[in-house]
Amino acid sequence: SPPSPVVNIETQGSAGCVPHTVNFESNYQYGYNTSFVWEFGDGQKAYTQNPVHEYTEPGVYVARVTIEGDGGTAQATAIVDVHFLPSPAFKFSPSFVMLPDQPVQFYNTSLNSVSYLWRFGDGITDTIKNPVHQYTYEYLDGHDITLVAISDKGCVDSVTHRNAVIVSGE
């Protein structure tokens, strides 16, 4: 009788942030090279030996490849862990600053995040959760404020408020 087919997935333990692209690689013996069926665990399929697939939703997926040969069918699986992105958000007060001594308080309302990088639009940055920032006369007019949020899995996202803080001298 013909030997049973064998298939292995070389891509094991793939993990990443949404969207996460995986280059699946497989090797096989005793199977038809036209019989590959990949099921990625998210409802999508492919029919090549080494497909590329993008996961667009967070979750843990079981990717499965099936191959047929004269001696039957073989399957292999791999786990893919797709992480949430953080949801950066913030408020601030005031939005109109009169120098020399009126600071701006930033209130971080981000979700799914553990560390932060603030860009205040004047070349100054900060990494604390709820910073207070003092603008100077060198940087009058409107400032774009950006908050970069990082999750416990290292996923990164950012939000920018354009011309958020208007700075004026006396």
Image (spheres, helix red, strand yellow):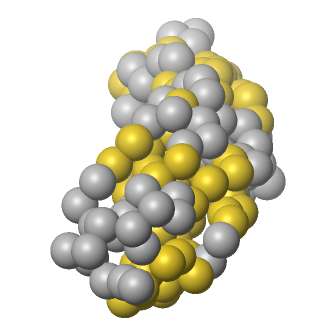
- Whether residue 81 sits left or right of residue 161 in the image: it is right
Viewer-side residue, 34 vs 105: 105
The C terminus appears in which quarter of the rendering? Answer: bottom left
Query: Visible in this render: residue 133?
Result: yes
For this view, does 70 lie left or right of residue 8? right
Give the quarter of the figure containing the N terminus. top right
Residue that protrudes farthest toward the front in the picture: 170
| Residue 82 versus residue 27 in the image, above or below | below
Residue 9 lies, in percent from the top left, at 47, 22
Give me the residue at 46% from left, 62% from top.
101
Q: Nearer the viewer, residue 131 or 147?
A: 131
The answer to whether 5 is drawn above or below residue 17 in the figure is above
Give whichever of 58, 43 is nearer the camera: 58
Does 137 sit left or right of 127 as displayed?
Answer: left
Q: Evaluate whether residue 28 shows in this view.
A: no
Q: Where is residue 35 in the image (x, y as percent from the top left)?
A: 55, 45
The residue located at (61%, 28%) in the rendering is 114
Q: Nearer the viewer, residue 85 or 30?
A: 85
Q: Residue at x 26, y 74 (%)?
A: 137
Say above or below: 102 vs 21. below
Q: Is residue 36 above or below residue 12?
A: below
Image position, residue 34 (x, y; %) = 47, 50
Q: How many marks?
A: 0
Q: Position of residue 57 (x, y in %)?
A: 72, 51
